[in-house]
Image (cartoon, rainbow, N blue to C red):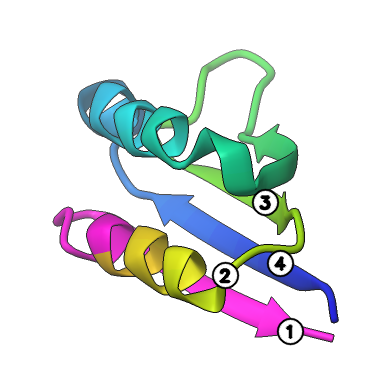
Amino acid sequence: MRTIMGIEIQNREELAMEVQGLLTKHGCIIKTRLGLHETGNFCSPSGLIILEFAPDDKGEYDLLEKELNEIEGVVARRMEF
């Protein structure tokens, strides 16, 4: 089974450090990380992070998703294949 998580951050400048802290805390379960945001003449205030998890205990995925969703302005959703 493969587990992917999408994380939408509404206010990147304000919330980036808090989100990064959680990703670092749970870093051992993260196999791949991809960050996306609009660029051009401006730097978008919102962003999207896509994570691919290493095979691990599902409870750890649940905990990270719960902690991320507790941050106002952050939405985390998980997909399993």
User: Residue drawn at (70%, 56%), measured in percent from left and top?
Assistant: 53
Q: Which residue is mark 1?
A: 80
The Cα atoms of the two marked residues, 1 and 3, are separated by 13 Å
Q: Nearer the viewer, residue 69 or 28?
A: 28
User: Residue drawn at (59%, 38%), measured in percent from left and top?
Assistant: 28
Pinpoint residue 80: horizontal percent, then vertical percent.
73, 84
Q: Quadrant of the N terminus?
A: bottom right
The Cα atoms of the two marked residues, 4 and 2, are separated by 14 Å
Asked whether the beta carbons under mark 4 and mark 1 sit within 8 Å of each other, the answer is yes
Q: Which residue is mark 2?
A: 57
Extreme top residue here? 41
| Amino acid marked by disc 2 | Asp
The Cα atoms of the two marked residues, 3 and 2, are separated by 19 Å
Extreme front residue here? 57
**Of labels 3 and 2, the one closer to you:** 2
Q: Earlier in the sequence, mark 4 or mark 1?
A: 4
Pinpoint residue 58: horizontal percent, then vertical percent.
55, 76
Q: Residues within 10 Å of mark 4 (few under 14, many from 20)?
A: some
Q: Which residue is mark 3?
A: 50
The Cα atoms of the two marked residues, 2 and 1, are separated by 14 Å
Q: Which residue is mark 4?
A: 4
Q: Secondary structure at mark 2?
A: loop
**Of labels 3 and 4, the one closer to you:** 4
Q: Nearer the viewer, residue 42 or 79?
A: 79
| Amino acid marked by disc 3 | Ile
